[in-house]
Image (cartoon, rainbow, N blue to C red):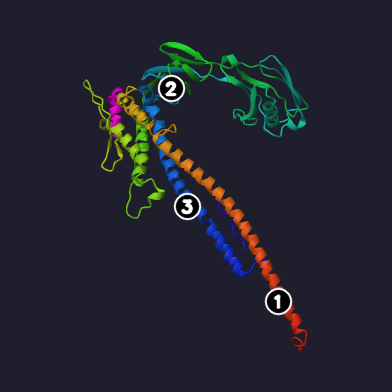
Amino acid sequence: MPGPSIEPIQGLSPDFQVAFQKAIQMERKPIDSLQAKKETVQSRLGLLNDVIGKVDGVKKILPEIASGNRLLELLVNSSNDRSVTGIAEKGKAIPGSHNLEVLQLATPASALSNGFADRNETKIGTGYLSITLANGEDREVFIDNDSATLDGLVRVINSARIGLRASVISDRSDPENPYRLMLTGEGMGAENSVEYPEFYFIDGDEDFFIDREKSAVNAKVRYQGLEIESPTNEVKDLIEGVTVNLRGLSEGPVTLNIDQDTPKTSGKVKSLVDNLNQVFTFIQSQNSLNEKSDTSKTLGGDYGIRTAEYRLREALQGISINGGDRTIRVLGDIGVQFNKNGTLTFEQERLEHALKNHFEEVADLLGGDGITTGVATRLARSLSTITGSQDTLLSSQRKSLNDRSDRIDKEIQSKEKIVERKTEALKQKLIRAQDAINSIQGQGMSMAAQLGGGGGGFPLK
């Protein structure tokens, strides 16, 4: 909290001004000292918040490696992605191969008008269109002279919200009259068939009418020898846990392979390693002390961060799963281990090889039993003692520093009020003193003037 500026007192002599400034500076010394203490506390608090944020970053990743279902990432490879693609849902999709054939895509109902030479000049006439909506409501939409072109009709239909989308297309099958109004239903599939409007126009340059219509149809696929229909091209109930996207007709069966997305799964482990290294590197940087280090504003040698580092290292170094003819027993078997710098190294190729050939063992090593074994289990237990509730290691330190900062603030506020009172009191004293001096000086000058005006001195007796 900045102290009040010490402004000169109007009418005060230079000597009094200097005395006033020095007196107030002396009064503010305890406040300046408290401000320095607060800066130290805030500096340490900022560093503590930084390391807590890094520790919490590790916490956020753990659920993604805590079980095989969460760890496993799947992708869908298509033998013809111009015809079919897919997205696998984690935890539901099962790796495997599926063959299907796209016989027909789902399409909305659509219609085309007759052709016109242009889209924004030739008048189609004024009038109205009449339509029965899907809910049975009869609607009439009027077309005035300002909207009596294809582009104008598009604007009116789209703003009327009658369950149809309008657009102008260019159909070069008739080069002299290529522009047509297209009407498209808003829903896909046979269940979303529409009733097209009837148009009533007069005084147009050319007649306007619906030339072609096509009903809405369902998508059709052949899967496991059976023909199946879908109202949309996004089919969610065909392959368990997979959303199948139909993109085009296929000339024969298309194969969808649901495979493990090894790079994405290894990315989770890399993210864990990176976040742990951020914690270790931060703590090491704080503990890099020499004779010139100012430890008052750092966490160098701090008990909390040293203990936090110890607990994290102990959790990782104590991980070992034995028994049977396991290949994956320790973190080093999946390419993760401590180096001489005190941080973790990560070998992506080794991890991906382990994921491809021993996924269940890797998942067991990372997730554990949820009680004592596994990376996620042991780290979660250690992290729960470091941050979280106010009685954990670093969180309690943060609370202590916050409390200390608040106490300093209150003390500064109290002393500021005392200084303000003393400043005002001293100011008034100096003003009165200056007034007294000015008065005395004024009397002296007046007396001197009187003596000087009487002929040079007192009369002699």
Asked which quadrant contains residue 138, the reply is: top right
- Residue at the farthest front position: 461
State yes or no: residue 360 in magenta.
yes
State yes or no: residue 51 in magenta.
no
- Residue at the farthest bottom position: 460
Q: Along the polypeptide, which appears first: circle 1 or circle 2?
A: 2
Q: Residue at x 78, y 85 (%)?
A: 454
Contact between marks 1 and 2 (CB within 8 A): the answer is: no
| Residue in front for this viewpoint, 247 or 66 | 66
Residue hosting label 2: 89
Q: Is residue 149 left or right of residue 359?
A: right
Q: Is residue 271 above or below residue 237?
A: below
> Which element carries disc 3, helix, strand or loop?
helix
Give the x, y percent position of residue 269. 35, 32
Which of labels 3 and 2 is toward the front? 3
Residue hosting label 1: 444
Mark 1 crowdedness (10 Å alpha carbons): few <14, some 14-19, many ≥20? few
Q: Is residue 38 above or below residue 81?
A: below
Residue type at tag 2: Glu
Q: Gap between marks 1 and 3, in whole Å?
A: 50 Å
Residue hosting label 3: 36
Give the x, y percent position of residue 152. 70, 31
Q: Is residue 183 left or right of residue 315?
A: right
